Amino acid sequence: AAAVKYAYQATAKRPDRFYNYYLLAATQAASGDVEAARKSLAQGQRDHLYNLQELRIGHPFMDESLFNRFVENLRKAGWTA
């Protein structure tokens, strides 16, 4: 819930940054709100379609398992890259 709140704040402060919507989608999917996650992902994809390599470069995680969890939640939201 705290991550969803943070991601909402990020999109509210900077709605022009598409990757904030990817973050919001992943947090919403992780919290079980898949319908909202799909909408957030669609919003981010309107501005930029991330592929896996770009996602890895744009969101470097020190722990590979956390990156994999992020990707898994994006896939729950409908991300297919």
Image (cartoon, helix red, strand yellow):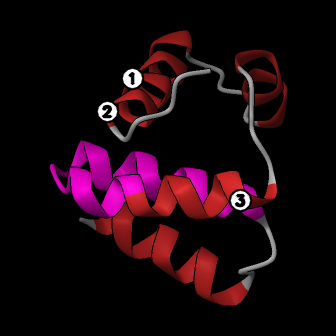
**Mark in front: 3 vs 1:** 3
Where does the C terminus fall, quadrant-wise? top right
The Cα atoms of the two marked residues, 3 and 1, are separated by 21 Å
Task: Classify mark 3: residues with Cα within 10 Å, few (<14), some (14-19) or many (20+).
Answer: few
* Residue pointed to by mark 2: 76
> As rendered, which of 36 and 17 lies closer to the eye?
36
Task: Look at 30% across and 64% down and name the residue there.
Answer: 36
**Mark in front: 2 vs 3:** 3
Residue type pointed to by label 2: Lys
* Residue pointed to by mark 1: 72
Residue sitting farthest toward the left? 32
Task: Look at 53% across and 82% down and name the residue there.
Answer: 9
* Residue pointed to by mark 3: 46
**Magenta-tinted stretch:** 18-38
**Residue 11: x percent and y percent?**
61, 77
Query: Which SS class for mark 1?
Result: helix
- Label total for image: 3
> As rendered, which of 36 and 10 lies closer to the eye?
36
Instruction: Tell me which secondary structure the magenta stretch mostly adopts.
Output: helix
Contact flag, marks 2 and 1 (Cβ < 8 Å): yes
Query: Which SS class for mark 3?
Result: helix
Task: Look at 70% across and 18% down and name the residue there.
Answer: 52
